[in-house]
Image (cartoon, rainbow, N blue to C red):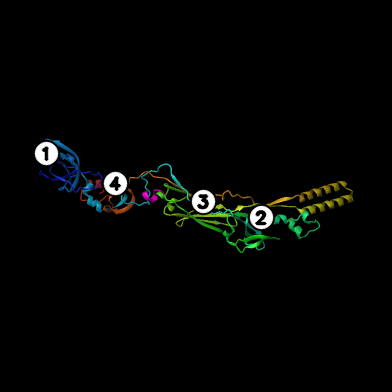
Amino acid sequence: MSTFSIYFWSLSKRENSTLVPTTGRTEFKCRLLDGSGIMNPTIELNIGLAQDPSKFNYCHIPAYERYYHVTEWYFNDGLWTASLNVDVLATYKEQIGNSTLYVLRASNAFDGRIVDTMYPLKTGCTYSHPIMLSPFKTNGTFVLGVTSTQGDYGSLTYSVVTAGGLRSICNYLINSAVSEGNGFNLSDASLKLQTSLIDPLQYIKTCMYYPFPMEDFDLQTATTSFNIFLWDIPQVFSARISGTRIRKQFTVDIHKHPQTNARGNYVNTAPYTVLTLFAPPFGVIDIDTTVTCNASTIDFTLSVDPISGKGVLFVECNGVTLNRLEAQIGVPIQLSQVTKDWLGAASSTLSAVGNIVGSAMTGNVGGVISGVATGIDSASRALTPRQQSMGSGGGFIDIYPYSYKLDHQFFEPVADDIQHHGRPLCQLRQISSLGGYMLIQDGDIPIPGTAEEAQRIRSYLESGFYYE
């Protein structure tokens, strides 16, 4: 068989690279041994001992229009023999570069929104705690639900008073009760008697403390007196409620993962970033990082019912409601007053007198003693002071003294290797426009070669290759 030219190089090249040498070649006249194929030919160089071609590891056979790796050199009977293996990536570089393929990973482009699961997380984490002030104020106010013939809500009106105003109301009602010490007489069944027989506090049906100043309520015109049934209590600043809710809005900044710029926005999602909101009395709330990863703040809207004390917290980000939580904001306050049953005492005394007269007329002395004893006992019980209470005691532990805060936990992935593994891209791209390392999905491309060469190319592209 006649000889033909083959060009040789001593080349440093990755096995899965399209690199084609352009300079520094050495030409030899070679002969193809019998039985050699195109994919793995064996060639013979008749150059004797004058040169040592074993330093060359790469060649190009123009006649076959293919590039080859030299897999082995042999020297026998004064002749050098080389075993070759076709380099399909270099041979069909043009066809590969002109192809538009779905690139899963690339070293020269990436989409930071795609989670890169190639790299595991390190144990431990770093923390960040952006703190916002609590929506609750220490200068809170009280809402009183009072029976009225002109009730705004059924038979009740609801008014807001300060702590000093509530103290004035309680002092006034306690001191207004009628007793023997301020001129009460059993024979005087006057209006004053009637008011003393009724616990004034029973007209205050509810008393609720709210951790908000008076100006946070939607109120009617304020007054400087407070009316409860027959009692007009002066010098108490109050205002009736006209609105249906107290509304507070506030925001908190979202801190980004320390490796956002280096790794992409995906590290601002779980499991790399964990966000937890501490918002008493609503509790500890997990935040969905798939929404917050593209935002800089979280918005909060707190709505409180001034009648029931029920609060609803809306947690929102980018217009998406992350959570809706309910909790009791208003603290029920217990009110009480000491009273005497003067009417009971009068009735018991009159009953005793009747028994004495009746028994004396019949000569029943025992009955007289019994009747008198019964009357005295009943009157004694009636005159014993009794404590009347309204409502139940509440607590402040859930609203004071905490501030809201957004806890960040940042988990760090191990170091990446972009040059050899790339980063997620998941886009259709022309291969020559990217360059560098790429991992292809479905690397089947048309080539003017054999079926085995096409299969080799596909295997390289789908397991990762370098276009260079």
In this figure, which residue is indicated by the disc labeled 3? 404
Dot 2 or dot 3, earlier in sequence: 2
Dot 1 or dot 4, earlier in sequence: 1
The foreground one among 147 and 12 is 12
Q: Residues within 10 Å of mark 4 (few under 14, many from 20)?
A: many
Could you tell me which secondary element the residue under label 4 belongs to? loop
Residue 87 relative to residue 104: left or right: left
**Count of numbered labels shown in the rendering:** 4
Q: Which of marks 1 and 4 is in front?
A: 1
Q: What stretch is highlighted in magenta?
A: 257-266
What residue type is disc 3 on? Tyr
Cβ atoms under marks 4 and 2 closer than 8 Å: no
Residue 29 relative to residue 91: left or right: left
Q: How far apart are marks 1 and 2 (CA)?
A: 116 Å
In this figure, which residue is indicated by the disc labeled 1? 50
Q: Distance between the residues labelled 2 and 3?
A: 31 Å
Asked if one can make out residue 34 in the rendered structure from this viewpoint, the answer is: no
Residue at (79% x, 48% y) in the render: 377
Vertical arrangement, residue 84 with respect to residue 293, above or below: above
Dot 1 or dot 2, earlier in sequence: 1
In this figure, which residue is indicated by the disc labeled 2? 167
What residue type is disc 4 on? Gly
Residue 435 relative to residue 387: left or right: left
The disc at residue 464 is: 4
Q: Residues within 10 Å of mark 2 (few under 14, many from 20)?
A: few
Q: Distance between the residues labelled 3 and 1?
A: 85 Å
Asked if one can make out residue 326 in the rendered structure from this viewpoint, the answer is: yes
